[in-house]
Image: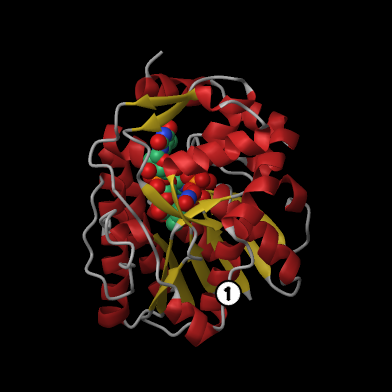
């Protein structure tokens, strides 16, 4: 079977390529990625020469690029990780998010219909549900929670989910959707909270915490996200949505303090800064459906996963420093000031 892994040079797609190329030597994985600021071929170096892996540069919102890759390989499965993924960037530049995340998904699904692809899997997010109140720890997002996205990023992901469901109903496309909570682990771009804090703490730089630091995220190690997607693609039912999460809710300030403890750095590095506009208060996933129907379970707690993640960021300084050039510095100045 041939699998098209879009966005496979990014954080989660890259981890998925590593996982799947190793686990399924009998299948061929074609990574299709536009190599935006977030795409990094260095992430794929360990598998680049494997016989069951091929990299193709292309843009999911460009119909010609997509048709070319479908024409060249007989694509049986598509797993769509490709997206603009950073909420803060979506607040600065919403248009690109709508183009990549919505139109890109449409272009891919049109190709799936033309080429009679067996399955299109859309990698989505818990952010489609909006947020939960901080004073109701009993509430969790289920697959039936109404969609109520807050940021341009989450609206673009919600739109893509709805389009995927419409393609399933209208054209009979075999579609599954996964909605995962916040990921962390190796190869994460250092604009996201955890790798940003690790990098800045290592340099003894101030650590920007938005607002009062009490917003809650539900953290899942990227390895567990990969095994969940694998379970859905191989065992999930067409037209179904699966929430992914591992009950690892933490307030942002506690995440930052945990990282400082692991690094043995002082809390005095923490700096409370202007809040993110429209900042979602709390995310928390109910993964009962994927656990009971597909037998999936995560292997990492936050405490178990954060230590090797900090260590990975220490051991892979070159990977991080190679990113911290022109485009990255421009965004950091726009987002945080000088
Ligand atoms: P990322 O920003 O690290 O990587 C995105 C990848 O997509 C990059 O390699 C980039 O080059 C590629 N890409 C962007 N636009 C493209 C285009 N037009 N055509 C082809 N490739 C393009 O993102 P990530 O954190 O790895 O997220 C991957 C997916 O998982 C996204 O769909 C995101 O919405 C979803 N998700 C992320 C998280 C998280 O915590 N990071 C959680 C749940 C869901
Ligand atoms: O929940 C899943 C989502 O998680 C994914 O769909 C997104 O692609 C991914 O980027 C992530 O979104 P968040 O906005 O939750 O992640 P981020 O790492 O940007 O921020 C995590 C929390 O930390 C959030 O409450 C904002 C806060 N934060 C973030 C940054 C970058 C800070 O306090 N300071 C910062 O500098």
Give x and y (percent) for residue 112: 43, 71
Query: What is the quadrant of residue 45 in the picture?
Result: top right
Count every numbered label the image shows and give the total.
1
Q: Viewer-proximal residue, 24 or 137?
A: 137
Quadrant of res 39? top right
Image quarter where the N terminus lies is: bottom right
State the residue position of label 1: 297
**Would you say residue 259 is visible in this rendering?**
yes
Nearest the viewer among 116 and 184 is: 184
At horizontal 66% and vertical 40% (from top left) the residue drawn is 310
Q: Is residue 164 above or below residue 302?
A: below
Left or right: 26, with 69 as reference point: right
Q: Which residue is drawn at the image coordinates 74% and 53% (left, top)?
A: 47
Asked if residue 333 lies left or right of residue 201, the reply is left
Query: How many other residues sit within 10 Å of disc 1, few (<14), some (14-19) or many (≥20)?
Result: some
Q: Quadrant of the C terminus?
A: top left
Which image quadrant is residue 227 in? bottom right
- Residue 139: horizontal and vertical position, in percent? 30, 67
Q: Position of residue 88 (x, y in %)?
A: 34, 36
Q: What residue is shown at x 41% (from left), y 83% (from top)? A: 238
Name the residue furthest top.
338
Instruction: Please determine whether, in this image, residue 293 is positioned above or below residue 21.
Output: below
């Amino acid at each position: 079977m041939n699998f098209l892994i879009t966005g496979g040079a990014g954080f989660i797609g890259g981890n998925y390529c590593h996982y799947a190329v190793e686990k399924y030597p009998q299948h061929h994985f074609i990574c299709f990625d536009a190599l935006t600021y977030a795409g990094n071929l260095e992430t794929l170096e360990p598998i680049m020469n494997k016989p069951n892996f091929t990299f193709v540069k292309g843009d999911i919102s460009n119909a010609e690029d997509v048709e070319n890759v479908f024409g060249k390989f007989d694509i049986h499965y598509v797993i769509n990780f490709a997206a603009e993924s950073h909420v803060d960037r979506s607040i600065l530049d919403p248009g690109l998010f709508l183009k990549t995340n919505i139109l890109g998904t449409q272009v891919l699904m049109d190709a799936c219909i033309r080429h009679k692809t067996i399955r299109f899997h859309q990698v989505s997010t818990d952010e489609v549900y909006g947020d939960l109140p901080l004073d109701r720890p009993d509430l969790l997002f289920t697959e039936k929670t109404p969609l109520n996205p807050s940021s341009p990023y989450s609206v673009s992901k919600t739109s893509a989910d709805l389009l995927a469901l419409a393609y399933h109903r209208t054209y009979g496309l075999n579609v599954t959707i996964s909605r995962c909570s916040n990921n962390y682990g190796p190869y994460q771009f250092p604009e996201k909270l955890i790798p940003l804090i690790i990098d800045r703490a290592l340099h003894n730089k101030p650590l920007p915490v938005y607002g009062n630091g009490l917003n809650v995220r539900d953290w899942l190690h990227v390895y567990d996200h990969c095994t969940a997607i694998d379970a859905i693609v191989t065992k999930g039912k067409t037209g179904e949505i699966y929430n992914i999460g591992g009950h690892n809710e933490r307030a942002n300030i506690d995440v930052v303090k945990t990282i400082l403890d692991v690094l043995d750095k002082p809390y005095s590095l923490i700096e409370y800064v202007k809040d993110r506009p429209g900042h979602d208060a709390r995310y928390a996933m109910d993964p009962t459906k994927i656990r009971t129907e597909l037998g999936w379970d995560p292997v990492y707690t936050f405490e178990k996963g954060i230590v090797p993640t900090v260590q990975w960021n220490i051991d892979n300084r070159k990977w991080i420093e190679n990113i911290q050039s022109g485009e990255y510095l421009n965004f950091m100045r726009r987002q945080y000031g000088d």
